[in-house]
Image: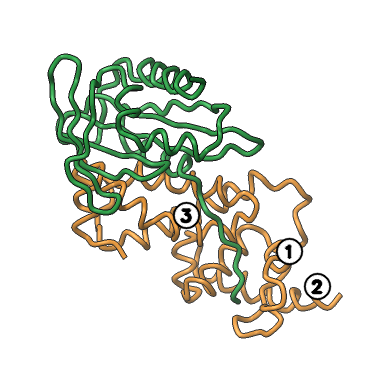
Chain colours: A orange, B green
Amino acid sequence: MIEEQLVRAAQRGDTVAMNDVLDALTPYVGRICGPIALSDGPDAAQEALIAIFRGLRGLENPAAVFGWARAIAVREAVRVARRGQRQQPAELADLPAADDPQLTVDVQDVLRRLSPEHRAVLVLRDLEGMDEQAAAAVLDVPAGTAKSRLHRARASFRKAWRS
Amino acid sequence: MTDWPTIELTDIERFRALAAGVPGAVVTERVLPAEPDRVKSMLADLDVFAEIQADLVSATVLERDGDRVVVLAKGRLGQRARLTGQLRPGWCWLQSRFLIMGMAVAAEPGGGTRVALTGGIRVPGRAAIVPIRVRQESAKSLDRLERLLRA
């Protein structure tokens, strides 16, 4: 966690406090960007941190720094992953339920089958424990879109998994 | 789900991000033909650190608590700066009211060591650097470091 006071000091121009905020945010940003951007994860995390430090002064609620950083990390990870997509876009695969045992089989394989946007939904839901409405807010899509993405995804994912 | 892919950023990648939050800061990077551990240990020595900075004659650690340090830097014109910040192998970020100095080191994929420097005259008390000659000064510091590594 980061103390609100530390974030405020960083916002006031204390660069050593900025360094401390960097130490605190780097693992978190990496945890978000890794599963969404996959092999482009380091690029995504670096670009997310750059956006975070460029925008830190404008953060209105320093207590919400992690939520704010999460939104930036997801946005950058999806953007960098799309830019770096070298293979043909995979057919839309679907997400297994959070408690589905097949999900534990091979996460890497599951993730590779998904688009960056769907990986983002999966990360926000399963890794960050957010509900679909909160995930939709982070992704800046209507709640119904996130919900239907998730819903449509599940059945066909299983189909793909079995085939 | 337990085995989510994780990533770790190098200090160079982290350094670029931190410098991006400091308007006026220019990050100058160079890949040097030396082992990372050797470069890190050289730069962890503040005598070396001072030697490669054009304007410094010495830098002395006054206080240390883990990787947190207070450093007294003396300049060629007799000026003194009390810098605070973080100093550990491969990473240095120091500030005084009027100065910011930063350095990061990471192994370069394919061999060698990437070194990144930034710093300069700080807009007093702010996260900003007066953008005068910062690129040239960092390039000269890297030249000196390269010479020291060859010696």
Q: Could you tell me residue A138's position as x and y percent?
A: 45, 62
Residue nearest the viewer, comparing A78 with A5: A5
Marks 2 and 1 close (CB-CB < 8 Å): yes
Q: Could you tell me residue B56's position as x and y percent?
A: 25, 21
Disc 1: which residue: A113
Q: Are marks 2 and 1 on the same chain?
A: yes
- Residue A160: mark: 2
Q: Are marks 3 and 1 on the same chain?
A: yes
Location of residue B70 (image quadrant): top left
Residue type, numbered disc 1: Arg
The residue sitting at 58% across, 52% down in the picture is A41
Subunit ID for the residue under disc 1? A
Give the SS element for disc 3. helix
N-term mark: 2 or 1: 1
Quarter of the N terminus of chain A within the rendering: bottom left
Disc 3: which residue: A73
